[in-house]
Image (cartoon, grey):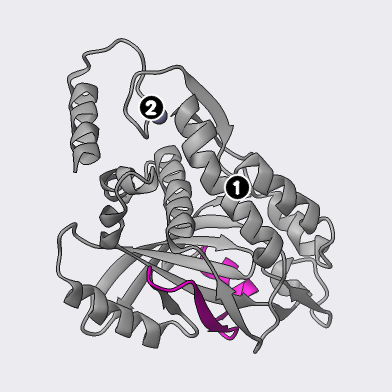
Amino acid sequence: MFKSLKFLLNYAEFISGSTSMPNCEYCRQPATLTKEHLWPASLHKRLYAINQQTKNIFWLSRLQRDIPNEPQIRDVCAPCNNVTLSKLDDYICKLFDSTFKNIVERHAELVFEYDYHLLKRWLLKMSYNSARIHNSPDRGALECVLPYILGTDLRMGRSIQLFVQLVHPQEISEIEANKDGDPQKKILVEPSIHRLGHVIFRAHGVGQKTLRAIHLRSYTFYLAYWQPNGGRAEQNDFAEVFNLGMPGVQLLRPSDQKVKLFCDGIGAWDSLKDARNARFSSEVDA
Ligand SMILES: [Zn+2]
């Protein structure tokens, strides 16, 4: 409670502009700000190294020509960046080495082991960084849970649900990826691109809901935002409908450390294609 109050006071100071130093976008304290890339260097190094081994340089290199340089963030103080948030990056690198580095084959069954809060806080941190760069509509919702992202109030995370879905490699004809490609030639597209975006989920009885999506190789994570202090019934109803409407999706729960997953959700090419139409929107590819 005290920490939440302190956060609000810091926020009030930020609003009143009572200091001439810029404020950190996480702790809201005036500070000298640091510069970093959206994707943490430690993770990016791993992703870069593993993508050098991909069998699909052809389509990957073509796709990357459309991708702008990786954006930078310059509004976080050193203690937040190098201590609090960097612990989340360390956890994700560990999870990358044990789990994300492997491309999951279609129809594979596996047990995904995770630390619920470290994983969700990292996904929210990435979303918040991306939302500031792109001025995304969920920026306000993410600001509401800053104490959760910083680990000072874990209860505040209850207003956000976390889902996971496995993306499988998908065979397509070469011409689908490249208009100069050979229509007779088949290529296998693996889910090797990491990116952030949004998904608009529409379902009868639920209406339309915009979710944050974070794609990390075979794993796609979805964050669903709810009103702070709202009832659980609405969240439970949504989880049921989302689970039925999105193949292979599983809700992750803070009380669990593992979940059984079946890899038959969405194909890697369909996932990328959907990111470019109205139903799914992608903010960043890297
Ligand atoms: Zn800070």
Q: Which of 65 and 248 is in front in this view?
A: 248
- The answer as to whether callout 1 falls within 8 Å of ligand 1 is no
Q: Is residue 128 magenta?
A: no
Dot 1 alpha-carbon crowd within 10 angstroms: few under 14, some 14 to 19, many 20 or more? some
Query: Quick one: label 1 or label 2, which is nearer the N terminus?
Result: 2
Q: Name the amino acid type tagged 1.
A: Asp
Q: Nearer the viewer, residue 134 or 21?
A: 21
What kind of element bears circle 1? helix
Quarter in which the N terminus is drawn? top left
Q: Nearer the viewer, residue 183 or 203?
A: 203
Residue 105 image point, x, y percent: 70, 82
Q: Which residue is rendered at x = 69% and y = 64% of the image?
A: 98
- The answer as to whether callout 2 falls within 8 Å of ligand 1 is yes
62 versus 263 height, above or below: above
> In which quadrant of the rendered view does residue 263 lie?
bottom right
Q: Mark 1 points at which residue?
A: 90
Q: Name the residue under label 2.
A: 24
Query: Is residue 273 visible to the viewer in this orientation of the structure?
Result: no
Q: Name the amino acid type tagged 2.
A: Cys
8 versus 258 height, above or below: above
Q: Which residue is rendered at x = 60% and y = 75% of the image?
A: 167
**What are the residue bounds of the magenta stretch?**
254-276
Left or right side of 21 for 119: right
Left or right side of 7 for 88: right
